[in-house]
Amino acid sequence: MASLSTHSEQSYLQKILLAPVYDVATNSDLCKLEKLSSSLNNSIWLKREDQQPVKSFKLRGAYNKLCHLSQEQLSVGVVAASAGNHAQGVAYSAKRKQIKAVIVMPETTPDIKVDAVRRFGGDFVDIRLVGSSFDTASAEAQRLAREEGYTLVPPFDDPDVIAGQGTIAKEILEQNPNIDTFFIAVGGGGLAAGMAVYIKQLRPDIKIVAVEADESACFKHALEHDEPKALEHVGIFADGVAVKLMGAETFRLCQQYIDEVVTVTTDEICAGIKDIFDDTRVIAEPAGALSVAGIRKYIKGRGISDKNIAGVLCGANINFHTLRYVSERCELGEQKEAVFAVKIPERKGAFKNFCQLLGGKVITEFNYRYAEEDQAHIFVGVKLREGLVEFKQITDSLEENGYSWFDLSNNEMAKLHVRYMVGGRPANLSNEHLFSFEFPEQPGALMRFLQTLGENWNITLFHYRNHGAADGLVLAGFDIKDEERSAFDKHLDKLGYSCEEQTENPAYQFFLAGL
């Protein structure tokens, strides 16, 4: 492959216009989201890449890459590392070109994704499950390319892949020339780079806004350092954009042509999934709803109206079990629900008095547990008809009536774990330390945890939460004396799971910490 820096913007324009993606890809619909458009007072258009044979845009870039390989390269075959949509795009393209494709996936990849790759690639695909992380799988793919001669098909940082994704922008401008603002999801940057370089060559007046999950904002991080820099950690919910390090070429193009970056929370992504469903009855995967989540947040934050705005539903390969989690969180993202903690007096009638204070508000959740002789702690959710204005009215009323409270609407640990655990508090547990973990969803993961930590320290609290991703979410407490902390940290390093201490988290201190 030629050096990335040799590709001019004009050459990209040519590559996009001539990309033979329609051998396999569909010129997907551009649908107006009528309900969302009405509520946001703008015309919101959504490019339906869920209509592709593999249910995501990744097919475009993968096939375009294969079409630019030499006959010698095709005869040897290709290799790709992916646990998701890129793998399916490569598999489908390999079968169409009738060449061998080795797809390296982590051992933690859900069966539904492995089966999809096998179904799309058939006898032309060799699936290899290696390691427990994408980094390990990627290293193996690079080894196979280096030692066995396969051509590596990168998921984003490749001119032919970038150009394939850029065909989406060409279609949108043909379908609606009046679009004045684009919102484009960013993971590794291939989609945003390809679309942005095309749009700005033809219509430099169009505004382009990149949308990232705030748990994996690698483009924003790169902009802050003026070059791609790896994130220390990425969140797992929007796994399609969970990229620690964006590509060098994708960063060059995005930095030059993207006007703004907006990041969205998990709750806002869930609200975006619901927005898309309400208008189309299609269920987007979390990464696929990023652009809509960004549109809602941007418009509400800027007071924009009467614009023609386009986003891309870039994928709909969602694990069915994720829907339970999305349903729980979407109203928080729409600012239609708030959750908070409140102290109430432990006396007759106090519970009734608190409910009366809320008036006719719809209670979505109420968790109560006797805490001490003179007070009780409650975890409460309230449906909001008027958004944050109504929430302020509620909290002002709480303060006026002497209640001690704090907002949990943006406390991730409270929403993932504590809401399900409100209960008794130990009387004497002064050495308890709390940690959140991401467990790989694979046989033996829990036993490894227990053998590494549970045999050395008493586990005082444990809550497991899976929401359909490749990793489960665990909250665990340990009885650790001060003089044992150094040894405990060494065992944490040995365990190798993503971990964050939560001992000072106010939700823990309020509901679960020892008295």
Image (tube, rainbow, N blue to C red):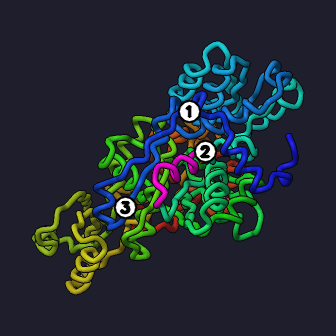
Q: Where is residue 463 shown, x and y percent of the image?
A: 44, 47
Q: Where is residue 293 shown, x and y percent of the image?
A: 44, 58
Q: CA distance from mark 2 to mark 1?
A: 10 Å
Above or below, 261 relative to 460: below
Q: Could you tell me the amino acid type at mark 3? A: Ser
Q: CA distance from mark 3 to mark 1?
A: 27 Å
The answer to whether mark 2 and mark 1 are in CB contact below 8 A is yes
Q: Could you tell me the amino acid type at mark 1? A: Ala
User: Magenta segment: does it hold 62?
Assistant: no
Q: Which label's residue is closer to the chain start, 3 or 1?
A: 1
Question: Residue 381 sits in which quadrant?
Answer: bottom left
Answer left or right for 63 relative to 262: right
Assign the N terminus to one quadrant of the image: top right
Which of 223/2 is in front? 2
Answer left or right for 164 relative to 177: right
| Residue segment shown in magenta | 167-178
Q: Could you tell me the amino acid type at mark 2? A: Thr
Disc on res. 43: 3
Q: Residue at x 48, y 51 (%)?
A: 460
Disc on res. 25: 1
Secondary-structure class at tag 2: helix
Q: Which label's residue is closer to the chain start, 3 or 2?
A: 3
Q: Residue 444, can we see it?
A: no
Q: Residue at x 46, y 54 (%)?
A: 176
Q: Where is residue 2 shown, x and y percent of the image?
A: 87, 44
Answer left or right for 67 relative to 457: right
Disc on res. 167: 2
Q: CA distance from mark 3 to mark 2?
A: 22 Å
